[in-house]
Image: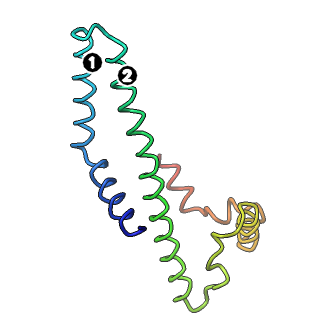
Amino acid sequence: MDHIFTRISGGSSRIMGRPVSFIISVLFVIVWALSGPVLNYSDTWQLIINTATTVLTFLAVFLIQNSQNRDAAAMQAKLDEVLRALENARVEFVGIEHLTDAEIEKIREALEHDIGDGDGRNSTTGTTVERLLERY
């Protein structure tokens, strides 16, 4: 079941993310708007666009969430592999994405404190980043 859903959601995401899909959606809205005077702006006329947008938005939420979950899991696996492969890396960081937000924030604060001045801002951004930000 997972494999089938992944194939369907992946294919749907690719189709929905293309410019032609956006153009078709815009054309649909234009045709709907132009049909208003012909249909006397009836309740049925309004129901068509309301129903279509509601259903498509509802389904798109699941596609977007699935795509984000898959991307995040793949990225996490890649980062875990980097940690595993580096000789001096702390492999204890593998799997910290399963901790609570508060626990992750404590780890982030501890790392910034270890790096330098305690607040982390100057020590983690460095002069290179500050110079880059000054350019823009």
The three-letter amino acid code for the residue at tag 2 is Leu
**SS under mark 1:** helix
The three-letter amino acid code for the residue at tag 1 is Ala
Q: Is residue 18 above or below residue 39?
A: below
Residue 4 in the image: x percent, y percent? 35, 66
Left or right: 87, with 64 as reference point: right
Is 35 in front, or is 16? 35
Residue 94 in the image: x percent, y percent? 61, 80
| Residue located at (24% from left, 44% from top) | 19
Image quarter in which the N terminus is found: bottom left
In this view, which residue lies farthest toward the bottom? Answer: 87
In the rendered image, which quarter is residue 46 located in?
A: top left
| Residue located at (50% from left, 76% from top) | 77
Q: Is residue 31 above or below residue 41?
A: below
Q: Is residue 108 above or below residue 43?
A: below
- Give residue 47's mark: 2
Q: Label 2, label 1: how many angstroms apart (C-alpha)? A: 12 Å
Residue 123 in the image: x percent, y percent? 67, 66
Q: Earlier in the sequence, mark 2 or mark 1?
A: 1
| Residue located at (45% from left, 65% from top) | 70
Q: Is residue 77 above or below residue 102?
A: below
> Which callout, 2 or 1, points to the residue nearer the camera?
2
Residue 10 in the image: x percent, y percent? 34, 60
**SS under mark 2:** helix
In the rendered image, which quarter is residue 90 located in?
A: bottom right
Q: Which residue is mark 1?
A: 33
Is 30 in front, or is 48? 48
Q: Specify few, some or many for label 2: CA neighbours under 10 Å numbering under 14, 14-19, or 20 or more.
A: few
Left or right: 135, with 40 as reference point: right
Is 96 in front, or is 69? 69
